[in-house]
């Protein structure tokens, strides 16, 4: 009986160690967890958040999962963005939703440039004016 309990306890510890290894492997594939940045332009500040980020080079970061751009005037939601910290630009080629007080734009991506002063939407875009 004690041998059986020891066997069960040993198997439980090994499965916990395997789960820990899997979790550490998943986390190690991400350079930044929950990155937060800001694009500062002459008119306002755009806060940028995501669930994951990976460095592409010294200036560019690939932001993944629940990427959010938020200012006092608008919000943009998407899944993948390349953010350039040096140029203060962002580009996405995934489905994106822009929301402001009286406007909503769904597009196939966007480009934020000129330090956040300009936004260009890509692909099929649907604009809803309220």
Image (cartoon, rainbow, N blue to C red):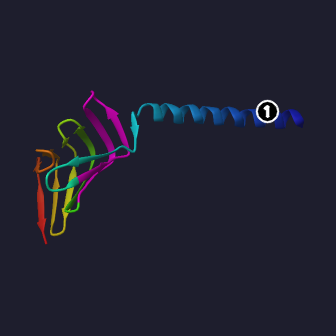
- Pointer 1 residue: 7
Q: Residue at x 65, y 35 (%)?
A: 15
Nearer-the-camera pick, 13 or 54:
54
**Farthest top residue in view:** 57
Residue lying at the far front of the rendered structure: 42
Q: Quadrant of residue 129?
A: bottom left
Q: Which residues are magenta?
A: 46-71
Judge by depth and name the residue closer to the eye, 15 or 80: 80
Q: Secondary structure at mark 1?
A: helix
Where's residue 58, x and y in %? 27, 28
Residue situated in front as seen by the camera: 82 or 128 = 82
Residue 80 lies in quadrant: top left
Q: Position of residue 27 (x, y in %)?
A: 47, 35
Please identify the residue farthest to the bottom as the structure is shown.
130
Q: In what quadrant of the picture does the C terminus appear?
A: bottom left
Q: Position of residue 44 (x, y in %)?
A: 19, 56
Q: Position of residue 85 (x, y in %)?
A: 24, 37
């Amino acid at each position: 009986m004690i041998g059986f309990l020891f066997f069960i306890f040993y198997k439980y510890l090994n499965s916990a160690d395997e789960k820990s290894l899997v979790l550490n492997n998943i986390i190690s594939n991400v350079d930044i967890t929950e990155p937060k940045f800001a694009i500062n332009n002459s008119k306002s500040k755009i806060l940028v958040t995501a669930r994951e980020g990976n460095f592409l080079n010294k200036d560019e970061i690939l932001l993944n999962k629940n990427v959010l751009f938020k200012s006092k005037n608008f919000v943009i939601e998407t899944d993948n963005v390349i953010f350039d910290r040096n140029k203060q630009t962002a580009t996405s080629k995934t489905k994106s939703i822009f929301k402001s007080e009286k406007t909503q734009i769904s597009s196939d991506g966007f480009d934020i440039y000129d330090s956040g002063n300009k936004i260009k939407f890509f692909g099929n875009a649907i604009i809803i004016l309220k």
